[in-house]
Image (cartoon, helix red, strand yellow):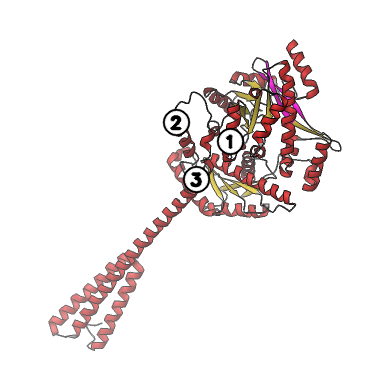
Amino acid sequence: MQRFLFVDYAQVIISIFLVISSFFINLLFGIPGYWISTALALVQIYVYTALFSYRLNYNMLVLIGLALLSILVNTIFEFFIIRVSERIESLGKKLSAEKAKRISYETTAMIEKTMSARPGTIVRHDEIADKSGYAEAVESSRSMALDPLTTLPNRHMINEHTDIKILNYKKAFQDASDMGTPCDVNPIYAIYITVSDPVRFSQSNGHIVVDLFIQTMAHRLREAADSKDFVGRIANNEFAIITTRLKDDTEVLLYAVEISKALNEEKDGNFFAGIAQYPRDAIYAGELIQHAEAAMYDAVKEDTDAKIYEPKEGEARTSFLEQLSIGEIKKLFDEAFDRDEIFMVYQPRFDADMNLTGFEAFARWDCEDKGRIEARDFLFYAEKTGHIYALGELSLRQSFETLALINEIDPELTMTINLSTTQLQASDLQIDLLAAAEAAGCNLKNIIIDIPSDGATMNVSEVQNTLDAFASSGITMSLDNFGRGYSSLNSIPLLPISLVKLDGHFTADLKEGTAQDVLTRSMISLLEEIDIPVDATNVSSKEQFEKLKEYGCTFFQGKYLNDPLPKKDIIEYIKDYKKD
């Protein structure tokens, strides 16, 4: 067009249009567009130079200048785009690094806070002669709190965090109760999340593909969850979120559904969530997470995003106490103590050769109006109303008095006392226990204190001095209910534990080849290797007794051996046993 137009300004207008066109070509097509526009400008320069040489038309110099301007503008623009892209990519990498650093810092801070008090409660075995092994054990315990694949808190840390939340809930409830005001603290929710995708988790994909997917899922879950919530990895493709922000099931169910949908990047139906609540569905951390897991499996079966835990038959509390206000329950407890309705019974404990080795004390409540109240129920409400301390005083006094009578017949028999996590935190527990033992005339070496498994994973700074004093005085401490919920072997070397009691629910089904059978046998073997004797509780049949004996259990107690005895019958029982 410029070749056949002899009007100078028309040629200039066409060149300006070409400059603008080349800019938009560069803008739309990126680097390919840049090379196209540059080639177009070079063709223009060639043509204009030839025309100028042919006719000495100085207007061609203006057109050459416009073509050079086109090349300059596009080059500057392309350089700018490249620099901006590099900057955006760099900022993206820094942002990801900062997020990872923040998550790692928050997790490490929680671990340091929880673990800081533990060195003082290492078992003082004589064979630990140097501090290097001690330091190595502590450092190993710290590192094990993080999941190495995802850098999220692992199952052990989830359990510890939940324990701390439960303790805070109990304290808030007690403070409100003491002040006579309603407790407005939110419940504690555990959300158990898994992915059900046989394609991604096929063995043919290999562990690298599976690991990458789990890492991706962990990152997306951390981003989808609220920053105030605690996120950790249970195992394999299973994760947990602990939250205290939400007030009711409706809110937490919507939250779980939102998280499931956020995780479902490609299609719906892969991610499932189960929800359990403290204090309604559980009384300790392991049970809370266990029930959330059960709800998750129900969600998988029903193919729904999220499901609230529903107790199975026989698990639901049907106690009349649920229908009473806290004030009414307090009054009922006060009357029970005044009427001596709460008392202790004692279950015999035997070794593998059926030799009587001691007794374990249990609290019972025979209410004048309601009859026998299940221990699980009234212990739960005793903690809520603050009567757990009065119950603990009664338990110590009666149990030690009975132990003194028992030792008059046999000075080697022991007495096991159960303490709740709340009692362990009481500042005067050490004084009260030692005073009660002295008043009854008991030998401290015949006393065994059961530390609940949920208390074994709590922040032990508040009970460190008490545990040290008990260990130094010769009192034996055992880890109770081991195997219920998510008890961990990690807690055993970090506490002055000389005995582990396997929970009856854990050893109830020991059929050959079942998961419980394999786990029970392996657990007893591991504990035997570190010289920790095992006490099997709730032994209900001869078959169960024989198997546990075969696996290496040291002590046994349960209905098969003998039901708990009241104090009035216990002396006669020991005398008859010795005659036999």
In what element is the residue under mark 1?
A: helix
**Quadrant of the rendering where the C terminus is positioned:** top right
Query: Circle 2 sits on which residue?
Result: 131
User: Where residue 81 appears, x then y in whole percent?
Assistant: 33, 66
Range of residues picked out in magenta: 343-362
Of all residues shown, which one is farthest toward the right?
369
Q: Nearer the viewer, residue 165 or 19?
A: 165
Number of the label disc, if any, that sits on residue 152: 3
Q: At x 51% / y 54%, what residue is drawn? A: 223
Q: CA distance from mark 1 to mark 2?
A: 20 Å
Type of amino acid at the residue the image marks with label 3: Leu
Of all residues shown, which one is farthest toward the top?
579
Type of amino acid at the residue the image marks with label 2: Lys
Query: Circle 1 sits on which residue?
Result: 465
- Can you say whether 563 is above or below 390 in the image? above
User: Where residue 519 appears, x then y in whole percent?
Assistant: 57, 28
Q: Is residue 554 left or right of residue 325?
A: left
Residue 308 can be seen in this image? no
Q: Is residue 385 left or right of residue 80?
A: right
Q: At x 57% / y 30%, what residue is drawn? A: 496
User: Where residue 114 appears, x then y in whole percent?
Assistant: 54, 42
Please tell me which of labels 1 and 3 falls first in the chain: 3
Q: Quadrant of residue 290?
A: top right
